[in-house]
Amino acid sequence: MEFFVFNIGAMLAGLALDFLIGDPEGWPHPVIWMGKYISWMEKKLRARGGNLRRGAVFLTLSTVLFSMAACFLILWAASLLGRWALFAAMAILSWTALSARCLAKEAKGVAGALSQSLPKGRTQVARIVGRDTSGLSRSEIVKATIETVAENTTDGVISPMLYLALGGPVLAMGFKAASTLDSMVGYLDEKYRDIGWAGARLDDLFNFLPARLCGFLMCAAAFLLGLNGQGALRVLLRDHKNHLSPNCAWSEAAAAGALGIQLGGDHLYFGKLVKKPTIGDNLRPVEIADISRAVKLMFVTSGLMALILVLVEVILCVL
């Protein structure tokens, strides 16, 4: 029990650092090293030839296990310096596992660029989405940004918070490794279908429970923010399966319902049209201010998740 209290404290410290500071420029972020390893190993596996689907399993397991092992070694070394050194290391690693501030910064950057011109908006949104952006309209850029904020509320905040609470930074780094694999090689096109399937499936598994928690928490956040909480819940229950991913539509549906807009639909990826169902109701045209509303939803949803984890910890301590 003492570990969980210590761990929750470190997670909250990391969350506070993320909310206040985000990811400083030049910070040696663990995801950078995960990405370097994935790129290097992918090239090795492709050069070796053979069954890339088997190679995908090795790529996935090695990335996740190496990331968790490296995190464990850092914490072990910190523990040799004492209890508070360990706490500081856990808090810093928790900080690196979260990305709320970074997500908000990128989303607001799109809003600012789009306010200046459509070409600048297209350039800026290309930083945070995988689809082709050269032909996106103003409303499509806004929708793409909202979808990214909603989806990454799960990937970048709720999921790592849950795994930080359950297994500390070591388990959270395992999740971040799976998430990084999915973002780099987890595509359905011919190039990545075989080498990326294992990472994509593991990421789906990791996000299964957090995505559903995030969707319902986002509905509650909508009520607290004075948005359409009832609409968020209605669209969530109706449209949570309207996505190629088993997880993404939960938070996207809640956001769409809260804002009274329609998300999803067909998009170009790597020059190919990918057909997707729509999410939400087209009750009104989207506007740039909806990006700010989506960011507020993300922050309040994250705060609710933190509150729930603390309450669960208190209840466990009492029992």
Image (tube, rainbow, N blue to C red):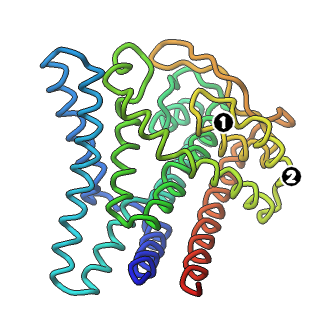
From mark 1 to mark 2, how far is it between C-alphas? Answer: 21 Å
User: Which residue is identified by label 2?
Assistant: 230
Q: Return the residue at label 1.
A: 143
- Return the disc, 1 or 2, that comes first in the chain's sequence: 1
Residue 154 appears left or right of 266: left
In the image, is residue 310 above or below residue 49? below
The residue shown at (19%, 20%) is 46
Say which quadrant the N terminus sits in: bottom left
Pick the residue in front: 265 or 208. 208
Q: Quadrant of residue 216?
A: bottom right
- The location of residue 85, given as percent across then percent down, is 25, 82
- Name which quarter of the figure residue 311 lies in: bottom right
Q: Give the structural element (helix, strand or loop) at label 1.
A: helix
CB atoms of marks 1 and 2 within 8 Å: no
Q: Amino acid at mark 1?
A: Lys
Left or right of 88 on screen, residue 209? right
Q: Position of residue 310 (x, y in %)?
A: 57, 76
Q: Residue at x 25, y 34 (%)?
A: 59
Residue 140 locus on image (x, y percent):
65, 30
Image-quadrant location for residue 247: top right
Q: Is residue 272 above or below residue 100?
A: above
Question: Does residue 73 lie above or below 139 as drawn?
Answer: below
Which amino acid lies under the numbered mark 2 shown in the image of this protein?
Gln
Q: Report the quarter where the C terminus lies.
A: bottom right
Q: Which numbered circle lies on residue 242?
A: none
What is the total number of numbered labels drawn onto the structure image?
2
Where residue 32 appears, as percent x and y from the top left, is 27, 48
